[in-house]
């Protein structure tokens, strides 16, 4: 896979294996920087995102840039318009195994709360594994004129139950992935997030995060 987002299959497989072996989100460095914005576009992208009622949809990607030996780890969040609430979560893969069959423990979790609560809990890994040693330290968000909350909720259940894989699928014999990035992308795609960059199988999280064109870009300090 090159920086432009296309896969070199053999290269991606090797990188993907490294990511899975170390755990999709392990290790990551604690963020200490204050919350900042990177551009004028970012300011426009997040204005009103935490609004309690009305408005359209919105989505966020949470990042551990140093996760998985600096190939990155990601989680997701999406807004429930009109309710002032967000649904957010991730697949953490604490066992660091290349393959966990459907129904196995892949460190999948999700929660629901206000925008501020989402940022607070993601910044301290409040849900899984329950420690702030390796928190998410960056997040990128965007407004979305299209959204489908029910479809996204259904996809959350799907990604939590389908297991974890980077490599050859024992059921099909195909080289593929069902990792933290696949979970994040599939949930936000089901939400119908506007401007969501495609994430081919075996993609590198940190490369994909940089290709979220027009999304805000902020550091996330424990709060």
Image (cartoon, rainbow, N blue to C red):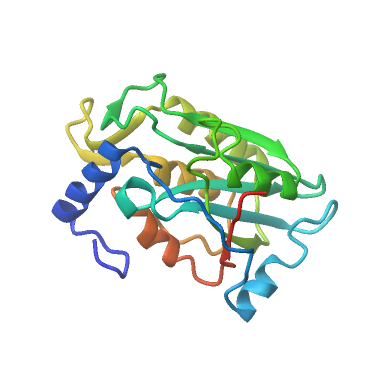
Q: Is residue 97 above or below residue 86?
A: above
Viewer-closest of 126 and 52: 126
Which of the 4 image quadrants contains residue 139?
Answer: bottom right
Query: How far across and down, in percent of the image, does residue 69 sit?
Result: 30, 49
Picture residue at 38% right of the left edge, 58% below the top: 206
Picture residue at 23% right of the left edge, 31% below the top: 169
Taking the image as shown, residue 146 lies to the left or right of residue 62, namely right
Query: How far across and down, in percent of the image, does residue 54 sit?
Result: 84, 55
Residue 114 shows in the view: yes
Which of the 4 image quadrants contains residue 117?
Answer: top right
Q: Is residue 43 above or below residue 126?
A: below
Picture residue at 46% right of the left edge, 33% below the top: 159
Picture residue at 64% right of the left edge, 41% below the top: 121
Tally the numbered discs: 0
Q: Is residue 145 above or below residue 68?
A: below
Taking the image as shown, residue 28 lies to the left or right of residue 43, namely left
Query: How far across and down, in percent of the image, does residue 189 sit?
Result: 52, 50
Viewer-closest of 151 and 181: 181
Residue 200 shows in the view: no
Query: How far across and down, in percent of the image, does residue 6 sit?
Result: 27, 63
Q: Residue furthest right?
A: 53
Q: Residue furthest top?
A: 103
Q: Residue furthest left?
A: 10
Viewer-closest of 79 and 217: 217
Q: Which quadrant of the rendered structure holds the N terminus?
A: bottom left
């Amino acid at each position: 896979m090159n920086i432009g987002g296309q896969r070199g299959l053999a290269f991606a497989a090797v990188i993907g294996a490294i990511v899975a072996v170390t755990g999709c989100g392990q290790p990551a460095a604690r963020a200490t920087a204050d919350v900042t914005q990177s551009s004028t576009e970012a300011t426009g992208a997040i204005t009103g995102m935490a609004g309690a009622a009305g408005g359209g949809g919105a989505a966020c990607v949470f990042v551990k840039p140093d996760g998985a030996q600096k190939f990155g780890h990601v989680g997701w969040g999406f807004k429930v318009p009109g309710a002032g609430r967000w649904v957010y979560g991730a697949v953490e893969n604490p066992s660091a195994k290349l393959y966990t069959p459907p129904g196995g423990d892949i460190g999948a979790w999700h929660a629901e709360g206000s925008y501020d609560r989402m940022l607070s809990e993601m910044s301290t890994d409040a849900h899984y594994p329950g420690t702030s040693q390796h928190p998410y330290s960056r997040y990128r968000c965007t407004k979305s004129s299209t959204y489908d909350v029910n479809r996204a909720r259904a996809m959350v259940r799907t990604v939590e139950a389908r297991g974890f894989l980077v490599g050859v699928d024992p059921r099909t014999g195909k080289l593929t992935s069902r990792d933290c990035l696949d979970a994040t992308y599939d949930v936000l795609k089901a939400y119908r997030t506007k401007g969501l960059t495609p994430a081919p199988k075996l993609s590198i999280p940190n490369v994909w995060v940089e290709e979220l064109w027009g999304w805000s870009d902020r550091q996330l300090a424990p709060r």
